[in-house]
Amino acid sequence: MMALMGNEAHNPRADQGLITPDEYLRILDAQLAPLPTERRRVAQSQGCVLAADVHVLTPTPAFTNSAMDGFACRLADIEKQGIPATMPVSADVPAGNPLVVLAPRTVARIMTGAPVPDGADTIVPVEDTNVPAGPRELPSEVRIEKAPKPGAHIRRAGEIMGAGEVVAEKGQVLTPFTIGGILSAGVSEVDVVPLPRVLVISTGAELLSASGGSASLDDGGTFINDSNGPMIAALLRQWGCTDVHNTSVNDDPEALAEVISDHAGLVDLVVTTGGVSAGAFDPLKMLADSGRDDVDLHFLKVAQQPGKPQGYGTIGDGRIMMLPGNPVSAFVSAWLYVRHVFGRLSTHPTRLAYVTGRMSASLGPFGGKRRFVPAVLRDGEFSLLGADRGFSHAASTLHRANVLLIVEPDTAATEGDEMRAIAIDRSAV
Ligand SMILES: Nc1nc2c(c(=O)[nH]1)N[C@H]1C(S)=C(S)[C@@H](COP(=O)(O)OP(=O)(O)OC[C@H]3O[C@@H](n4cnc5c(N)ncnc54)[C@H](O)[C@@H]3O)O[C@H]1N2
Ligand code: MOO
C-alpha cells in the first residue's frame, strides 16, 4: 500500500488516541476485498476494470479488404499494357458485399472496407484513374493513369491481430478506446469488476434539504445548504461511479437506519457526512449505541487536519464510511479514504498524484497533526486560500484549490520552502 507520506515507524500520537493516516488506510484495507466479478456487455462496461484477459475472436482485419475507394486489379494485367492502361470493369464491390472472383483481365470497382475479390492483388485509388470520385453509375471501363505499387491499399486478414491474441489485459480500465478495441476483436461480453454503487447521506438537522428546503436564511434561520452530499457524489462520479444516490437525513438515528435499509442490496457502499465528532445529537453515534446487533460502527481519530474524526463499519450487510461534517474535512477525507476504498472495491488504480512546489507564504505549525491544506499550485508556487489555522469549514475557498499541501506534524512551512502536495486537479500536474 502506498504511504500517504512521511515516516510511519513511530507514532507519538498513539497515547492521545490518535492514529496516523496510513494506519487508518491499513484498518480500512483489512475490511476490503474487490466486488465480485460480473459478466457484462462490453458497451455497458465503461469505467469498469477487466477481471480477465480478453482474447481476439475476430482477427483484425476480419477479412482482406480495400483501404481505398477505387478499382481492384491484378497488377500483372496492368503491367502488360503499361500506363495508361484501359481495363474493362467486370464487377461492383460495395462494403458488405460477399466475396467475388475477379474475372480474368478485368478490374472490379471497390469501396473502402469491401472484401478484395479473389484474384485481385492491388487496389488503384479512384483518383489515379479517369473516373471522377463520388457517387456514379458503374463505368464499363476505366483508364488507369498512374502505376500502382504491388499489393497497394490492401488490408490483409489478421495482419494487425490474429484470433486468440490478447486484445485487452486483466486490470485495464474499460476506456472508450478499450471498448472500441474489444468490440472490433469480435468480443461482445467481458468479465469485469463492477464499479461500486454508492449511497451518499448528509446528516444534520441544520441542512436545508434535510428540512425539506422550506427554511431560508432570509427568515433569520440557522439552516445551511447541503454542500457535502452533492460534492462527495460528484467526486464518486468523477472517479467513474455511475450509480450514485444522494440524500440527507435529520439527526434521527431511526430515519438514518431506514434510508440505509431501503437501499440494502442496491448499493455496495454508504458514505455519510456529519455526526462523527462529539455532538450530543449525532445520529450515527446514537445508532452505534442502539444495541442493534446488525450495527457495527467504529469511530476513531486520525492525526490530521482537517479530517480528524472518522468512522467506518457495517449496517446489516452494507459497508459504511462516515466522514466529518465540516465541508473541507469531508472533501479531504473523501480524497484520502473514500477514493482508496473505491479503488479497493473496483480494483481501479487510485494512487495519489504528488507534486512539488515552493511556498509563496508561510504557514505556522499545527500541533501533532499532518495537515492537508487546500492550496493552488501555479508556475511552481503554492498559494494559500483560506485562514492559516482552522479552515475546515471554509468550503467556499475549496473551488479554487488544485492541491492539498502536505505539512508534517509540528512543522511550519516558511515562504520559499519546497513542499509536497497531493494533486486534486489536472491543472496541478
Ligand atoms: N467537542 C468536540 N467538538 C468537535 C470535535 C472534537 O473533537 N470535540 N472535532 C471537531 C472536528 S475536527 C470536526 S471536523 C467536526 C466534525 O463534526 P461532525 O462530523 O460531528 O459534523 P457536524 O457536527 O454534523 O457538522 C460539522 C460542521 O459541518 C457543517 N456541515 C455538516 N454537514 C454539512 C453538509 N452536508 N454540508 C455543508 N456543511 C455541513 C455543520 O453545519 C457544522 O458546521 O467536529 C468538530 N467538533
Ligand atoms: O479535523 Mo476537523 O476535520 O479539523 O475540521
Image: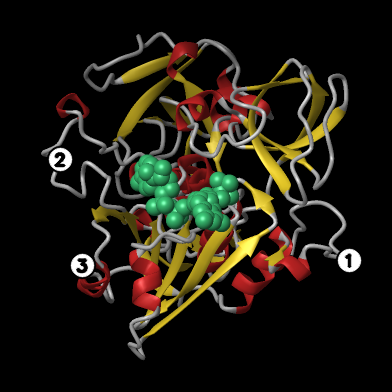
Q: Is ligand 1 closer than 8 angstroms to the Cβ of mark 2?
A: no
Mark 2, secondary structure of its residue: loop
Residue of label 1 = 9
Quadrant of residue 225 within the rendered picture: top left
What amino acid type should be assigned to the residue bearing mark 1?
Answer: Ala
Q: Which mark is residue 304?
A: none
Q: Residues within 10 Å of mark 2 (few under 14, many from 20)?
A: few
In percent of width and height, residue 1 lies at 74, 65
Residue 60 in view here: no
Give the vertical position of 159 relative to 399 (above or below): below
How far, Cα to Cα, is label 3 from label 2?
A: 17 Å
Quadrant of residue 318 within the rendered picture: bottom left
How far, Cα to Cα, is label 2 from label 1?
A: 49 Å
Query: Which tag is nearer the camera, tag 3 or tag 1?
Result: 3
Residue of label 2 = 213
What amino acid type should be assigned to the residue bearing mark 2?
Answer: Gly
Mark 1, secondary structure of its residue: loop
Residue of label 3 = 255
Give the vertical position of 209 relative to 218 (above or below): below
How far, Cα to Cα, is label 3 from label 1?
A: 42 Å
Left of 116 or right of it: where is 401?
Answer: right
